[in-house]
């Protein structure tokens, strides 16, 4: 039986307006996520990963606008919801946030309020979504923290965020995100601010949650190693575009786009030998307001041909379900 879809993003376009400047943060992004699976959105800083996530939940700042495309959410029961057509502050969008889709952010410290105890913050969230007393909410909050591996949970509810370590704070953020048992969890670089051992614990915790509740996860990261560990499918983004998309196996065993290949070569592999050097991608990500005549990666691409600088690449599907936007896979190629 084919797995049910939970999220479909089609040709999403989002722009930020800074004075008279228009920054195209998301430029026609398309991908799908199946129920119970993990999709990794990967790319360097400024490639539009977070803007895509914020667009899905309509959490864009005031100067940000969805300018085209469609974001559809498919609940377990009932009609699909077109999130991109919901009002930012409307009832439907508020129901979706937390209830169906939750988000955890990169920096737990800035997501938690330093002047309220951890317990107050979890209890407030619980009571915002369920009609329960403060006492019942406190019991639930302690159970939740306990389940997510925080020892002495009942006592720790009285502590403030600064009394928790980085890893513990991220566990609290996951607890808050999981309060209503959402079907989709969007994790925006959830382990970037943590050291490697704590990173591994948080990833393991997310996998446990997925197995227990069947949660679908959209994981935003710049780390190909993390993608390889926990994702089922991958969307590689560059300059607000998905340049390669496919199952984990397709993208990792047969990467097509030169940017994906370069990202993979920049990840250390255990036992790779002292003589092997990690490859860095020359140059920097261009400014978001740059308008490209050809391929946005052309200035940094080792495979760029004359055609690449003048013609934007179109998406092709070299194998079923594996999509790539690069002239190397169109007739005539990049050198034409
Ligand atoms: Fe490189 Fe050309 Fe492909 Fe762009 S289209 S990634 S410049 S080969």
Image (cartoon, rainbow, N blue to C red):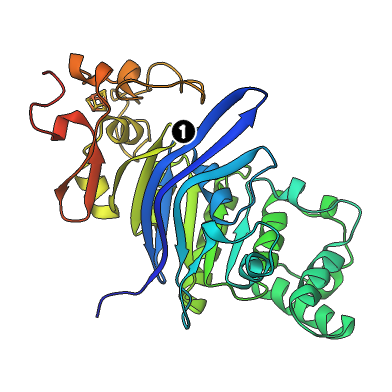
Q: Is residue 158 above or below residue 181?
A: above
- Tell me the quarter of the picture where residue 155 sits: bottom right
Q: Is residue 57 above or below residue 313?
A: below
Where ligand 1 lies, by quadrant?
top left
Quarter residue 259 falls in: top left
Q: Which residue is mark 1?
A: 44
- Residue sitting at 67 percent across and 24 percent down? 19
Instruction: Please indicate, yes or no, whether residue 190 appears anywhere in the rendered image.
Output: no
Cβ(mark 1) to ligand 1 < 8 Å? no
Q: Name the one closer to the observer, 229 or 9.
A: 9
Instruction: Single out the residue that lies furthest toward the left.
Output: 332
Residue 58 percent coordinates (x, y): 61, 53
Question: In the shown orientation, is residue 98 left or right of residue 257?
Answer: right
Residue 253: x, y in percent?
A: 21, 46
Residue at horizontal 80 percent and vertical 76 percent from the top: 127
Quadrant (top left, top right, bottom left, bottom right) of the N terminus: bottom left
Examine the rendering and report whether any part of residue 199 can be seen: yes
Residue at image position (66%, 56%) is 88
Measured as percent of width and height from the top left, residue 336 is found at 11, 18
Between 68 and 298, the residue placed more toward the observer is 68
Residue 28 image offset from top left, x and y in percent: 39, 42
């Amino acid at each position: 039986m084919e797995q049910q879809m939970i999220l479909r993003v089609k040709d999403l376009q989002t722009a930020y307006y800074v004075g008279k400047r228009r920054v195209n943060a998301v430029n026609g992004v398309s991908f799908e996520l199946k129920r119970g699976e993990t999709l990794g959105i990967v790319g360097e800083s400024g490639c539009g990963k977070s803007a895509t996530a914020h667009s899905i939940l309509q959490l864009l700042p005031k100067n940000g606008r969805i300018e085209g495309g469609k974001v559809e959410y498919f609940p377990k029961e009932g009609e699909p919801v077109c999130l991109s057509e919901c009002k930012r502050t409307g009832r439907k969008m508020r129901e979706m946030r937390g209830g169906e889709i939750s988000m955890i952010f990169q920096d737990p410290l800035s997501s938690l309020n330093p002047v309220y105890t951890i317990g107050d913050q979890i209890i407030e969230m619980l009571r915002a979504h369920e009609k329960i007393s403060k006492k019942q909410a406190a019991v639930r909050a302690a159970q939740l923290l306990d389940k997510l591996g925080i020892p002495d949970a009942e006592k720790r509810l009285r502590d403030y965020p600064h009394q928790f370590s980085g890893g513990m704070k991220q566990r609290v953020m996951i607890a808050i995100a999981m309060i209503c048992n959402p079907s989709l969890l969007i994790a925006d670089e959830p382990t970037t601010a943590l050291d490697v051992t704590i990173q591994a614990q948080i990833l393991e915790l997310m996998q446990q949650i997925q197995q227990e509740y069947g949660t679908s996860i959209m994981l935003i990261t710049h780390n190909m190693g993390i993608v390889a560990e926990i994702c089922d499918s991958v969307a590689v983004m560059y300059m607000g575009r998905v340049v390669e998309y496919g199952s984990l196996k397709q993208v990792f065993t047969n990467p097509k786009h030169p940017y994906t290949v370069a990202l993979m070569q920049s990840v250390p592999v255990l036992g790779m030998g002292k003589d092997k050097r990690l490859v860095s991608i020359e140059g920097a990500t261009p400014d978001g307001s740059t308008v490209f005549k050809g391929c946005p990666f052309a200035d940094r691409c080792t495979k760029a041909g004359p055609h690449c600088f003048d013609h934007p690449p179109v998406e092709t599907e070299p194998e079923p379900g594996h999509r790539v936007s690069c002239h190397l896979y169109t007739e005539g190629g990049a050198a034409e």
